């Protein structure tokens, strides 16, 4: 008993880090959990049936167990390592939070939260029945499970984020182009869990078709919900880009890889248009890669951020309007066709005005900061000067 108490007591060591390969294993196991949730969503959408012991539910349980087990194994390895000096210079084994690698701390909260939420969920279903529609995300057990899954999946993302913040080169990176793969996979798995809850809050977010129907609803209530869903998507997507580029410039393709799990999560709610939704979300990820390559938001210059905040919603929602018209034959009207991209562009610009560039440390590439957007501006000015002469 005394040993168990010592094991839980923090030894006050500096938090250890993990290798790229260990982060990659955690991110890959996270895909088992996220795609287990996606498969279960497809099953429920197709058959309208829910059971806590359905075969695909066991895939979710297995994924959660694998991710939690790997995180616990990483902490156990640090505990069993040779004793090192703590903050006071005393040699002792790592225990408590000091044994948990940097970035993996949330798993200590996620595991009990998932267990408690699961047990409460079983009682909830017996007493109140299985939740449907918005009740599925508003019920405390499901909300607790969603938060627990996100915390459990966050390890590799937080781990690599801390290394980028401290400008530490991670050990074991096989190639520069693979540097950000664990971060992208972990971010995608976390976002997939979020996507799986969105249609319950904004029902029109499940497909472009339902968005189109809501936008032409003469009653106005569904139209307002559709606008709210588009604004929420703009805010969340731009926030992800800003957070992901806070301390470094991701490798091109980062957001495309991060979009894979969310794309299938979004497509899991739809019947015949699953492929369209998957391709649409992947296209948005590719667009984010292009915009990050073009404007370099990691430099946190106000002009670059405003360009990103306006360009993303204009491109995405203009494309959405075009697809809605040609795929479903839904004419939204000139006000919606022009106003939807402009409204979201305004929201994106306002969001970027709240990003305080002066409070962020400059990334390494800021020392020689010149992006393709700078070159376009310089060439335009040169052409203007020549025409004036």
Image (cartoon, rainbow, N blue to C red):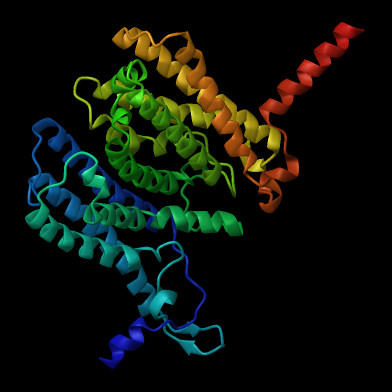
- Please tell me whether residue 221 is drawn above or below residue 60 in the rendered image: above
- Please tell me whether residue 381 is drawn above or below residue 91 in the rendered image: above
Residue 219 spot, x, y in % from top left: 32, 19
In the rendered picture of this protein, how many numbered marks are placed on residues?
Answer: 0
Is residue 278 visible in the rendered image? The answer is yes
Position of 217 with respect to 318 (left or right) is left
Position of 87 with respect to 322 (left or right) is right
Residue 235 spot, x, y in % from top left: 49, 37
- Please tell me whether residue 229 is drawn above or below residue 174 in the rendered image: above
Residue at (58% x, 56% y) in the render? 165
Quarter the C terminus occupies: top right
Position of 11 with respect to 293 (left or right) is left
Position of 142 with respect to 81 (left or right) is left
Q: State the image quarter where residue 116 is shown.
A: bottom left
Q: State the image quarter where residue 264 is shown.
A: top left
Residue 97 spot, x, y in % from top left: 41, 75
Residue 166 spot, x, y in % from top left: 60, 59
Residue at (81% x, 12% y) in the render? 383
Residue at (33% x, 32% y) in the render? 263
Residue 132 or 182: which is nearer the viewer? 132
Residue 305 or 19: which is nearer the viewer? 305
Is residue 254 visible in the rendered image? The answer is no
User: What residue occupies the far right of the structure in this picture?
Assistant: 389
User: What residue occupies the far front of the structure in this picture?
Assistant: 219
């Amino acid at each position: 008993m005394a040993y168990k108490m010592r094991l839980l007591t923090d030894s006050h060591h500096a938090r250890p880090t993990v290798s790229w390969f260990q982060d990659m294993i955690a991110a890959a196991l996270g895909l088992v959990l996220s795609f287990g949730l996606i498969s279960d969503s497809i099953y429920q959408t197709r058959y309208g049936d829910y059971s806590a012991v359905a075969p695909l539910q066991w895939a979710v349980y297995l994924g959660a167990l694998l991710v939690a087990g790997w995180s616990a194994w990483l902490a156990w390895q640090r505990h069993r390592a040779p004793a090192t000096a703590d903050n006071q210079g005393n040699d002792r084994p790592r225990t408590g939070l000091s044994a948990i690698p940097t970035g993996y701390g949330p798993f200590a909260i996620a595991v009990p939260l998932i267990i408690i939420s699961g047990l409460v969920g079983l009682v909830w279903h017996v007493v109140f029945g299985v939740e449907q529609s918005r009740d599925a995300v508003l019920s405390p057990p499901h909300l607790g499970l969603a938060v627990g899954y996100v915390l459990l999946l966050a390890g590799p993302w937080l781990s690599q984020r801390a290394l980028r913040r401290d400008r530490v080169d991670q050990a074991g990176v096989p190639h520069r182009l693979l540097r950000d793969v664990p971060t992208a996979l972990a971010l995608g798995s976390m976002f997939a869990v979020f996507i799986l809850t969105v249609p319950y809050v904004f029902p029109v977010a499940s497909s472009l078709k339902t968005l189109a129907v809501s936008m032409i609803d003469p009653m106005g209530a569904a139209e307002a919900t559709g606008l709210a869903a588009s604004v929420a998507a703009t805010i969340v997507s731009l926030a992800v880009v800003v957070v992901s580029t806070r301390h470094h410039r991701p490798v091109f393709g980062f957001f495309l890889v991060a979009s894979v799990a969310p794309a299938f999560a979004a497509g899991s709610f739809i019947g015949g248009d699953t492929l369209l939704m998957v391709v649409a979300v992947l296209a948005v990820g590719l667009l984010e890669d292009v915009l990050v390559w073009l404007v370099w938001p990691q430099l946190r210059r106000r002009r670059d951020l405003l360009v990103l905040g306006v360009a993303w919603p204009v491109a995405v929602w203009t494309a959405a309007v075009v697809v809605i018209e040609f795929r479903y034959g839904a004419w939204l009207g000139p006000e919606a066709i022009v106003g939807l991209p402009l409204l979201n562009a305004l929201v994106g610009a306002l969001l970027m005005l709240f990003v305080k560039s002066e409070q962020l440390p400059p990334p390494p590439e800021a020392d020689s900061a010149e992006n393709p957007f700078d070159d376009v501006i310089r060439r335009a000015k040169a052409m203007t000067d020549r025409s004036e002469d």
